[in-house]
Image (cartoon, rainbow, N blue to C red):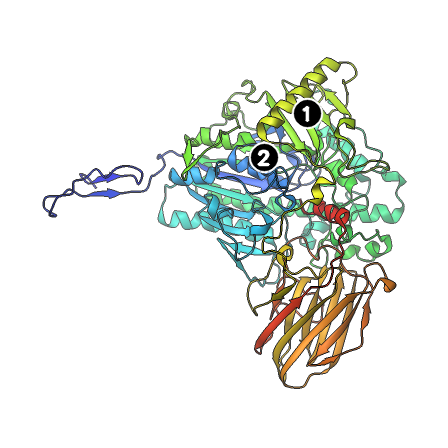
Amino acid sequence: MSGVRSYYDDEPFPGTIGLTFEESVPAWPRARRAPADAPNVVLVVLDDVGFGQLGCFGSPIATPHLDALAADGLRYRNFHTTAMCSPTRACLLTGRNHHTCAIGGITDLALGFPGYHGRIPKSCGFVPEVLRQAGWATYAVGKWHLTPSDETHTAAPRDRWPLGQGFERYYGFIGAETNQYVPELVVDNTPIRFEPPDGYHLTEDLVDRSIAMIDDLRGTDAEKPFLCYLALGACHAPHQAPPEWIDRYAGQFDDGWDAYRRRTHARQLAEGILPPGTDLAPRPEWVPDWDALDPDERRAAARMMEVFAGFLSHTDHHLGRLFDFLRATGELDRTLVLVCSDNGASAEGGPHGTFNENFIFSGLAHDQARTMALLDELGGPMSYGHYPWGWAYAGNTPFQRWKRETHEGGIGDPLIVRAPTTTDRGAVRHQYTHAIDVAATIFDLTGVAMPPVLGGHPQEPVAGASFAASLTDADASEHRRTQYYEQFACRAIYHDGWKAVTFHPFFPYLPGEDPNAPFADDRWELYHVATDPSECHDLAAAEPARLRALQERWFEEAGRYGAMPLKSGRGMAVGRPPVLGERDRVRLRPHTTAVPEPLAPNTKLRPHQILVVAEVGPGADGVLVAQGGRFGGFSLHVVDGCLEFAYNFAGVETTTLRSAPLVAGRRVLGVTVAPSRDDGPTAMRAALVVDDSVGDAEVVPRTTPLRFTLHGEGLTCGYTDGTPVTEAYRPPFAYPLPIHDAVVDTSGAEVVDVAAEIRRAFMIQ
């Protein structure tokens, strides 16, 4: 309005205050608005997608919508991440190195040191907070995995949830992974109970929500720019996709991972994704020759890859809907679109792959016969699978190694950028780029800068460097000359086209490899990655002086950014103190939000009892107390008027105890459980409790030693969420009558296997 004075919140009042209204001059505080030509930003993060898994990077997997985006934009073939999930996301969203952000590893594996404790300091402000204050709408959808594991519950502060880091709206899952058919979901700051409709899949839902948030904005404000951060669960395990997407790949991977690599490498060379003369890194000895597998092993492995391919193509299809929406609404030509992966393809399925991830972190031996019997279920709601590591080796073509490690297979990732300013669309860029550079580039192209103080907190310098010049100039000078890497004590340093790298066997593949081996024993390799990006020609022996100089530079950079101390198996045994203290008797409140498993009473391998005081009556069936779901957990419930206790061991076998019909009235119902080593190393004996009567103890032959699930399906009272522990009921199976009290008592001695706990942690990256 002409003549009306206004000012921003951080400016002094420019009006006049007199004794009376007539003697005063008003002025109105107003929110900042972005410039009229300010671009939107869409940042899409794929999960566990390797360099050689998108069609536009040489893969045989159909990704036509991402291919079209690349044809209308640019492919960055020299883009790098941290080799892990949480650390890369911290880099992307803050522009600082992961140790500066205290995210040296995943948030679930925090350590008591500044580079590793998992609580991103307020001195590392987020891109969305800066853009929000500058007038952008800010939305986050999908995977977060940047909240400390002890702050993911309903009593936790929310300052390290998405809305506490600058996003105005959020819809997604807080942890590392979730079931694509029955996800654990949070809306803004609140976990929700979610009963998915038939045909539901999380990827479709996340894209729907992204479109809806942008549409809601445009319903009110036609000009305000937005940041949409869409972090998909795909293609992290569990590999799950609708059958029609999986079946289109039937038979396409029967010739195996070696053939996949050869053909993908040839396409990468032909399409100019790799520099001429780039060699294909040889298959490591711990990945078997495809032809050496027996027919059942080949069939199972091929089917698991069909599932992954279907999952990725299904994801591409729904991303295409988002891109089509942006195009149809006229937003695309004012939008910076970036699509990347968070690390290389994942080898966490082990040498054989798995129908259920819980097999691996529960220490179960591979069972080929069971895998073959369940092949038709792979990718569906009855599976929670992951492919064999041979496919991770293939997915990272032409590189060696994979996620978690600092060779190129772990840190070399696809990046697609479409910007309104791009000129030679469809080209491949060669500039060395890191995840921290994404934030710097967003700041550059939006005309916004990280302020020296944000929210009252002095800010760490942004370590990233903008690559905006390369959007219009293929020969733009290198914006990044040096970058250090550290992940699980695997280390690397890049400088001016050279790379020194060493593998520390934190996760050993060969006999004799020791996670606790002295770091000085790790063998460093040297590569001229400017001409040998696949790290095929080790020059360490030929150029020892250059190697020593790079090693010294690594220590300088690692010291500057807080990468010390290096992690060992022994060091990882010292975990975060319990956030709620040591508790051996916990009272549950019925029908409240699930307690996340890390914060719930630990019933594993220790005596415990669950006692519930509830009203019993005709037709009063439902869950009393439950934890976990279809792929591992327990449930104390009433079915057909009888008390039951079901224990599901890793989806392999379910042991069910059942009482006689219950008498109506107020009853004490429960179960008492104790370890029974005579019946097996993890066996227990369980007995039902009805009032003052304890039934005969029955053997539960195998129990879960560590975790029922990786994320979600926590401890509930009066209902269950997620998948069912037993197929005898469908969630939520809420108990209809009053529950007066519920107690979980775990005062018995716990059996601890630290080594196994560390192995489990590798599954949640």
Residue occupying image coordinates x 58% and y 40%: 45
Q: Which tag is nearer the camera, tag 1 or tag 2? A: 2
Q: Tell me if mark 2 has few (under 14), some (14-19) or many (20+) residues whose alpha carbon lies within 10 angstroms of its own.
A: many
- x%, y% of residue 478? 56, 19
Residue 4 to residue 155: above or below? above
Report the amino acid beneath label 2: His
Most foreground residue, 403 or 12: 12
Residue occupying image coordinates x 76% and y 17%: 539
Residue 144 to residue 637: above or below? above
Q: Quadrant of residue 598?
A: bottom right
Residue 274: which disc?
A: 1
Q: Is residue 101 left or right of residue 250?
A: left
Q: Quadrant of residue 136?
A: top left
Residue 154 to residue 149: above or below? below
Q: CA distance from mark 1 to mark 2?
A: 28 Å
Q: Is residue 97 left or right of residue 683?
A: left
Residue occupying image coordinates x 55% and y 66%: 592
Quick one: quadrant of the N terminus? top left
Q: Earlier in the sequence, mark 1 or mark 2?
A: 2
Residue 98: which disc?
A: 2
Q: Secondary structure at mark 1?
A: loop
Most foreground residue, 759 or 648: 759
- x%, y% of residue 83? 66, 35
- x%, y% of residue 74? 56, 29
Report the amino acid beneath label 1: Leu
Res. 249 in view: no
Q: Tell me if mark 1 has few (under 14), some (14-19) or many (20+) residues whose alpha carbon lies within 10 angstroms of its own.
A: many
Quick one: quadrant of the C terminus? top right
Most foreground residue, 679 or 375: 679
